[in-house]
């Protein structure tokens, strides 16, 4: 673990750091912010977020950057490590009144040099669809706040879909929308589709198809973030109640759960191959959860405050080459699901995808992931094979990991997990995502289009024209007819006939004392404890963005500064003037 020196050095802002790959350098002239470069007064404002998209234009400079600062939203050409940022010419700039943008996501599937679809969520609950290239606002969803009045915490396009997107709110609800459909002029009526432990999914009852198509109620308190698996089949959600819940998105089945050590979980991400999930939150820890085993396999301690973002680095994650291994699942596991009108293309198999067999050990594997927090620190972590494939209990061997007890049960025997359904497990990812598209989460990779598989929602939203109220859904055991309600964003106001049953979803509280020491939340001494490769203070205000790109790492803080860190050997000085080179060299030498 990289430790800092005395008091003065502890407070220094670092502009470079070294890992086993080499030296990472901050590029001051590749910094993006508001045009006046004045630090934003962040008190009471929503976190700064960053989204990337590549337009694949002929110029070779197709990267675009979107970020929000306070009431403002900016859209720039992103020049990365190649050239200095030009803040005087944003492609699009918007200033909102009465509400603030909280999150955003590009549709990489439909992006072209002439047009791009950008979803923007707001603090008052609305979602806007805009085209920052054409400078158009095409649609506004939940405009009258009849669907949900609470803040939008996360918005993402459904992988492989041109029209479907998912929105999470601080009410604890998620909604599935179709851009082709309108929102009603009255509060929507719902009927129960599926219910499980601490979650319920409803369809919208209406004579004509309208938004939202689905309503998910998950856990208690705010649903802080969600992330799709690399193949888009699974959905990981983290909530203020401290739970990670992983769902099969198409069949609406709960695959597994995990509980934080204490406090809420704030962020979540998937490994490039979909085998591991990392979370961060108010316990100041990063937690690594195995998708196959449905259990915590490691925790990492390096932050001194809440962890705000976690992300895997697919460009540093490595596996030594050896003979390819066959996947241990059935042929059905490789079939593409055509639910929700998706059309996924074929993708190439990567070195990681060859090792999805749970009973074989790769020659050598290392997953790299990072985290940033409210302590203004960036931490990088290596998840190594002594953690992933332990053979016997180890002493406190300290390489980059601090192993306390590395005994591992066989794959699939992760204790009595209330989220496990006992069915055969389909790995959520069989391919490492391509370098582009770029986004806040891991890029969406594709799987082979070999057929289709029935599920609860089979054909429900195919082509975006079907209507849930008329479907015969084989897993729906009851039909509940809803009455009018005013506060539809509250679970207790969904209906009258089913309210008693549905209220169990929100009333079921898990006693932290009862979960500690179980497979849901192992004790600290029961799982390996990771130490960070590096832990550096890189900002004055809390960090809110961490994105790994092929030639750089992008971070951002609440002051509204988006920073580019060149990877080792990726600083093409010829693109900078001599004066810029000298200034950059002075800054680096001072560190």
Image (cartoon, rainbow, N blue to C red):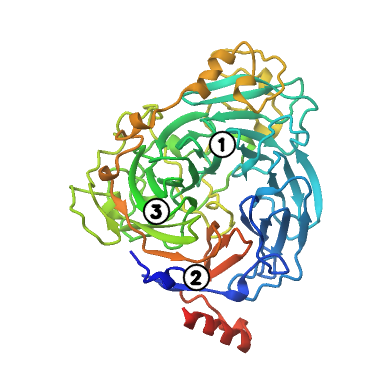
The alpha-carbon separation of the residues under discs 3 and 2 comes to: 36 Å
- Identify which residue, 196 or 430, lies in the foreground: 196
Q: Where's the N terminus, which quadrant?
A: bottom left
Q: Residue furthest front?
A: 7
Residue 345 visible in rendering: yes
Label whose residue precedes the other's in the sequence (2 or 1) = 2
User: Residue at the location (54% across, 22% down)?
Assistant: 194
Q: Position of residue 424 (x, y in %)?
A: 38, 31
The alpha-carbon separation of the residues under discs 2 and 1 comes to: 33 Å
Q: Which residue is mark 2?
A: 13
Label whose residue precedes the other's in the sequence (1 or 3) = 1
Q: Position of residue 335 (x, y in %)?
A: 49, 38
Label disc, if present, on residue 222 of the rendered structure: 1
In the displayed structure, 97 sits above or below 201; it is: below
Q: Secondary structure at mark 3?
A: loop
Q: Which residue is mark 3?
A: 352
| Res 33 → quadrant | bottom right
Query: Left or right of 421: which side holds 481?
Result: right
């Amino acid at each position: 673990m990289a430790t800092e020196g005395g008091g003065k050095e502890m407070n220094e802002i670092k502009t470079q750091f070294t890992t086993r790959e080499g030296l990472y350098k901050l590029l001051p002239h590749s910094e993006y912010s508001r045009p006046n470069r004045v630090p934003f007064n962040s008190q009471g404002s929503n976190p700064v977020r960053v989204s990337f998209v590549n337009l694949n234009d002929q110029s070779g400079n197709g990267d675009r950057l979107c970020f929000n600062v306070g009431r403002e939203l900016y859209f720039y050409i992103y020049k990365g490590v190649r050239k200095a940022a030009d803040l005087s010419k944003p492609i699009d700039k918007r200033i909102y009144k009465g509400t603030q943008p909280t999150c955003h996501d590009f549709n990489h599937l439909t992006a072209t040099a002439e047009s791009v679809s950008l979803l923007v969520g707001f603090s008052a609950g609305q979602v806007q669809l805009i085209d920052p290239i054409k400078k158009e606002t095409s649609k506004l969803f939940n405009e009258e706040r009849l669907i949900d009045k609470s803040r939008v915490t996360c918005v993402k396009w459904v992988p492989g879909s041109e029209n479907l997107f998912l929105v999470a709110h601080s009410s604890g609800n998620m909604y599935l929308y179709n851009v082709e459909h309108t929102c009603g002029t009255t509060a929507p009526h719902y009927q129960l589709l599926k219910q499980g432990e601490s979650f319920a999914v409803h369809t919208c009852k209406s004579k004509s198809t309208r938004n939202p198509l689905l309503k998910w109620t998950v856990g208690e308190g705010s649903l802080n973030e969600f992330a799709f698996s690399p193949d888009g089949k699974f959905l990981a959600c983290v909530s203020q109640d401290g739970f990670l819940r992983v769902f099969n998105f198409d069949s609406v089945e709960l695959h597994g759960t995990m509980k934080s050590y204490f406090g809420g979980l704030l962020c979540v991400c998937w490994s490039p191959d979909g085998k591991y999930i990392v979370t961060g939150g108010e316990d100041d820890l990063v937690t690594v959860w195995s998708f196959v085993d449905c259990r915590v396999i490691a925790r990492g301690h390096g932050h001194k405050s809440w962890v705000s973002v976690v992300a895997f680095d697919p460009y540093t994650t490595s596996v030594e080459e050896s003979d390819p291994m066959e996947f241990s699942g059935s042929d059905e596991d490789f079939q593409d699901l055509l639910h929700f009108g998706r059309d996924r293309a074929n993708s190439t198999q990567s070195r990681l995808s060859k090792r999805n067999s749970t009973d074989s050990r790769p020659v050598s594997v290392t997953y790299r992931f990072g985290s940033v927090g409210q302590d203004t620190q960036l931490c990088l972590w290596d998840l190594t094979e002594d953690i992933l494939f332990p053979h016997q209990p180890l002493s406190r061997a300290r390489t980059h990991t601090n192993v306390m007890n590395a005994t591992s049960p066989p794959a699939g025997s992760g204790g009595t997990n209330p989220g496990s359904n006992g069915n055969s497990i389909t790995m959520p990812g069989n391919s490492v995502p391509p370098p582009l598209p770029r986004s806040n989460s891991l890029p969406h990779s594709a799987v082979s289009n070999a057929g289709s598989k029935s599920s609860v929602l089979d054909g429900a939203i195919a082509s975006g024209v079907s209507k849930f109220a008329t479907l015969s859904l084989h897993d729906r055991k009851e039909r509940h007819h809803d009455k009018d309600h005013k506060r539809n964003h509250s679970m207790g106001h969904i209906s009258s006939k089913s309210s008693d049953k549905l209220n169990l979803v929100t009333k079921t509280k898990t006693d932290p004392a009862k979960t500690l020491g179980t497979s849901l939340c192992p004790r600290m001494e029961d799982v390996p404890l990771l130490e960070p490769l590096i832990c550096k203070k890189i900002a004055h205000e809390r960090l809110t963005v961490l994105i790994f790109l092929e030639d750089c790492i992008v971070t951002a803080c609440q002051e509204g500064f988006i920073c580019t860190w060149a990877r080792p050997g990726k600083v093409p000085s010829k693109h900078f003037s001599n004066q810029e080179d000298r200034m950059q060299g002075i800054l680096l030498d001072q560190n």
